[in-house]
Image: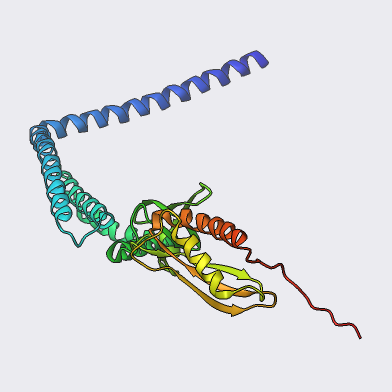
Amino acid sequence: MNVFAQQNVSNQAVSEVSNALSAELSKGNEMVNVAKEWLAENGIAFAVNLLVAVVILIIGSFVISMVTKAVERALVANKHINSLMEKFLTNVVNKVCWVFLLLIVLQRVGIDVGPMIAGLGVAGFVIGFAFQESLGNLAAGMMIGINEPFKVGDYVQAGGIEGSVQDLNMMATTLATADNKKVVVPNKLVWGSAITNYTALDKRRVDLTVRISYGSDITKAKQVIMAAVKSVEGILTDLEPTVEVVGMGDSSVDLVVRPWATPANYWKVVFACNQKVKEALDAAGIEIPFPQVDVHQR
């Protein structure tokens, strides 16, 4: 009984599989017949439309390339548009042209682009809501491009970071810090805070403070410091350095020393002035005092 029962179950399973395969083959034959009928009725027209769409795509790609290059040349020739805005506008024109070209090609092959356009509008709203931070960076990048507070190569303080601008795009600014760290700052932070450009102008003032003892000759100290500063290589000779008394400290008379230098020579002048002034004061016997406290005992 067990053997006959197993044989009946196997026969039933084989029958079910055969019926399922027959049903699928029947559906496949129906689909093939429908495809044949469609090709017989619309095959030539579809082939022609597909060929025309390919031709439109090829010609359109060349036209887009020419339009993009023409826009780029026009933007480069315009002195009021910087490189950041030039790249952004060129990229926008290129992408918009490609969208229109693809819509034309799809419509040519018989695809209704109306629902696609409506879907793009809804998708744009959803994407805009989801990428608020990115859109904020993009808007800030446009403001940076329009106002141009700095350019690639400038030494700036922006978004709380100080360094040389290595790269600049619509989303972020890349800085190289003085200790050779690469920092990418979102444009929203850059535009949302004060921007200090240390290299935008051709001159930069060096501010140093030199302290001498109360017993020292102030006039002599000023002359010694002035001579030492003027001997430093890299200071601007067309601007007279300033050496004046700026305050009376607890243990010293404080003198401010202000020579001028180019932004490229700024730190070189700072280091050289400190060394030259110290050596000159030592040679002249002018004391640079340590902090002192007078203690009175009763």
Horizontal side of 69 relative to 293 (left or right) equals left
Q: Is residue 123 above or below residue 56?
A: below
Q: Is residue 178 left or right of residue 291?
A: left
In x, y percent, where is residue 259? 44, 65
* Residue 129 seen in the figure: no
Image quarter in which the C terminus is found: bottom right
Residue beneath the point at 54% across and 74% down: 219
Q: x, y (%) of residue 85?
A: 26, 57
Looking at the picture, how far across and down is residue 164, in whole percent? 42, 53
**Placement of the N terminus among the 4 image quadrants:** top right
Where is residue 134 drawn, in percent x and y?
Answer: 41, 59
**Relative side of 177 to 104, left or right:** right
Furthest toward the right, the residue is: 298
Q: How is the image coloured?
A: rainbow
User: Would you say residue 63 is visible in this rendering?
Assistant: yes
| Nearest the eye: 129 or 201 | 201
Residue pictured at 62% horizontal, 18% vertical:
5
The number of callouts visible is 0
Q: Nearer the viewer, residue 23 or 250?
A: 250
Q: Is residue 71 above or below residue 224?
A: above
Q: Residue at x 55, y 78 (%)?
A: 246
For image coordinates 48% across by 55% down, the residue present is 267
Q: Nearer the viewer, residue 245 or 35?
A: 245
- Is residue 205 depicted above or below 105 in this figure? below
Which one is nearer the viewer's eye here, 22 or 139? 139
Q: Residue furthest bottom?
A: 298
The quarter holding residue 275 reads: bottom right
